[in-house]
Amino acid sequence: MAREGKNVPSDERVRRSVQRTVANVVALVLSVGILAAWSYFGIYQLEPGQAAVILRFGKYSRTVAQPGLRWHLPPPLETHEIVNVGAVEREEFGAVVSEKKPEDHDAMLDASMQTSDNNIVVLGFVTTYRVGDAFEARYRVADPRATLRDAAQAAVREVVGRMTIDGVLSEGRGAVQLEAQQILQATLDRYQTGLKVLSIELQEVQPPHEVRKAFDDVIAASQDRNRLVNEAQGYANEVVPQARAKAAEQTEQARGFKESRVAEATGAAERFRALANEYEKAPDVTRKRLYLETMEVVLPQVETLVIEPGTAQILPWLPGSAGRSAPPPAASAPPPVSAPKTEAKP
């Protein structure tokens, strides 16, 4: 064979070498093409609000949530499942039975709930949610929507069953929504549904049709009571500050009056002590000085009437002060008073 190879012409050897090279290139190109075609099946596109669950040989590998063109190992090495995690879903529960549809017993059963005081309330509500964990929502639970509906009904009934009918119909609606949402989310997390509860909103809360008018009267009375309480509170908020300000003003006035009186009394006491000391030193002089000072105060307020002797025919009336009222006139004038007689001495 070696001898035959040596006997092969050179052009034949070149031709065979070229054929082998071409065959290798073709095989390489085909391999690359097949590999590229196989890799193409690992390319996928994610839109905003979507997430891809990547499985490697059927086992969970990772979750990709960044939008755009993505790639993973081609099947059967890795596969992907796209889940919409951005959409907000809405589930309605219950239907209030009206007077026009009293025969809708199924809706009545779904909407009727018992309160803690053994009353029946007809309640409808809406739950909004979205997918929080794409893998759990896709593979952990067979029907996440049915699980959500059952859990939401149980959560709302549990909360309503702990409240009175007055609380559910009026001021307790907010508490029912918040507590029911917390219970529902805890239940869904325990079941690993991968759902995120956004809100629970009570739509219609009514008593049964047979007693609805009586409950309407009770609610109206409660609203009137709240209105009157608010009005009274507003009046108190207006009057009490004014009364407190007036009391503070009067207290300050009384404190000022007290301080002025105390100061006056203190000054009078000090003046008396000073006079007493001076009196002990010179009683006569001090007595005379006090008398003159008193006369200086009294005499300017006294009216002075000068009558010339022998000119008065009647007894004049001398008023004590200008501010006193005049007495009634006398019935008859008294007889004239004659001047006393004087005798000349020898």
Image (tube, helix red, strand yellow):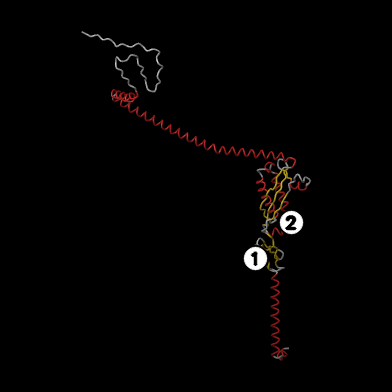
Query: Relative to 266, is 163 on the left or the right?
Result: right
- Mark nearer the viewer, 2 or 1: 1
The residue indicated by pointer 1 is: 68
View extreme (top): residue: 346
Give the percent coordinates (x, y) of residue 120: 73, 42
Label 2 crowd bin: few (<14), some (14–19), many (20+), radius 10 Å: few
Amino acid at circle 1:
Gly
Give the percent coordinates (x, y) of residue 35: 69, 73
Label 2 vs label 1: CA separation? 29 Å
Quick one: 149 or 193, which is closer to the camera? Answer: 149
The residue indicated by pointer 2 is: 143
The earlier-in-sequence mark between 2 and 1 is 1
- Residue positioned 74% across, 56% down in the render: 143
Label 1 crowd bin: few (<14), some (14–19), many (20+), radius 10 Å: few
Give the percent coordinates (x, y) of residue 258: 43, 31
Give the percent coordinates (x, y) of residue 99: 76, 44
> The N terminus lies in which quarter of the figure?
bottom right
Query: Relative to 81, is 261 on the left or the right?
Result: left
- Residue positioned 65% across, 65% down in the render: 68
> The C terminus lies in which quarter of the figure?
top left
Amino acid at circle 2:
Asp
Q: Give the answer, above or below, for where 37 lies relative to 49.
A: below
Q: In terms of secondary structure, where does tag 2 sit?
A: loop
Query: Relative to 306, is 202 on the left or the right?
Result: right
Q: In terms of secondary structure, where does tag 1 sit?
A: strand
Total marks drawn? 2
